[in-house]
Amino acid sequence: MTSRRALTLLVVVLTVTAGCLGGGGAAVDTAGAADAPATEPGEGAVAGQTDGDDSTPDLTDPEAALREAGSFRVTWQYAGVDTSGVRSEVNHEYAVDLRAERSLTVTSSTRDGRSDGGTSEQFVSDGITYVRSGPSDATTYASYPGTADVVGTAIALSQARAYGADEDLTARGTERFDGVSVTRFELSEASSPLIRAGSVSTAGSSGVVEITDFRYVVLVDANGLSRYESWSFTGRTTEGETVSGEWEYTLTGVGSTTVEDPEWLAAAREAVGR
């Protein structure tokens, strides 16, 4: 069964990143959650040709595998519409070159298309961490000695190990993603705990939410790494309000990622006197 810790983590992540989502979610009616076709993978995926089977993904320890590979790139994107109709979006990007001891982390968020705090960027090189934050018209810079190990932070955005423990996650054939062969797994039945993990966007509604669509896809390569994940749900309250949430995770450039200096590095060094 899916671990309670992982589901709790997912709910917390969605609650924090959605910004406007708060406590006291509505009840969930799972009766309308029929099996649904999975969302299509992101750019670079090609539809597979082989038949699926009943096996579950054989996932490896991602931290150990990525440290051995030496470099990688992770993106995580969330978008959700709550019961008031507000759309929140959050983006995280991580580019990591462990051998060169360089990394770049970019985080941004919006509410109804407007930035709600600007973009935050963190660049690590030569034992120094540089930080750029704030909107474009009020940017601030900081720096301090030391590095930030973002490997654990980046891979924690994957939920494959939690969903992979669910017996309903089954193989649906092979395809290619980011130039490598991957097996496609889909959640064939949205169980109640998994739907509740997605129902965080219904917070604030007093009515029962009927989940009208629930989808989860994960692409796993031959080394047991989750390369792509897509999770989404759509629901409707008794008041007729539509709620939704979706996130997408990608792991690319394994062993081939390089991290260039960001264009703002010179301004940051000047501002902090380095």
Image (spheres, helix red, strand yellow):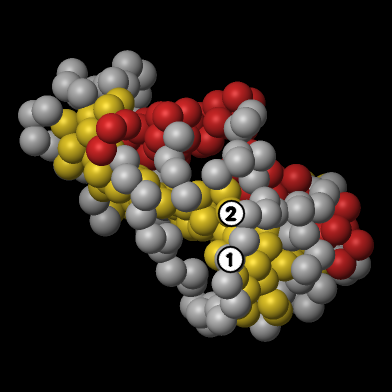
Which residue bears the numbered disc 2?
170
Which residue bears the numbered disc 1?
52
Residue shown at 27% from the left, 27% from the top: 29
Label 2 environment density (alpha carbons within 10 Å; few <14, some 14–19, many ≥20): many
Image mark count: 2
Q: Taking 50 as reference, is 200 left or right?
A: left
The earlier-in-sequence mark between 1 and 2 is 1
Label 1: state its secondary structure: loop
Residue shown at 42% from the left, 60% from the top: 38
Q: Taking 102 as reference, is 55 left or right?
A: left
For marks 1 and 2, give the CA distance.
8 Å
Q: Position of residue 189 (x, y in %)?
A: 44, 44
88 relative to 69, above or below: above
| Rendered image quadrant of residue 92 | bottom right
Q: Position of residue 65 (x, y in %)?
A: 85, 58
Is residue 198 in view from this perspective?
A: yes
Residue shown at 47% from the left, 50% from the top: 188
158 relative to 125, above or below: above
Q: Mark 1 near mark 2, Cβ–Cβ under 8 Å?
A: yes
Q: Quadrant of the C terminus?
A: bottom right
Mark 1 belongs to which amino acid?
Gly
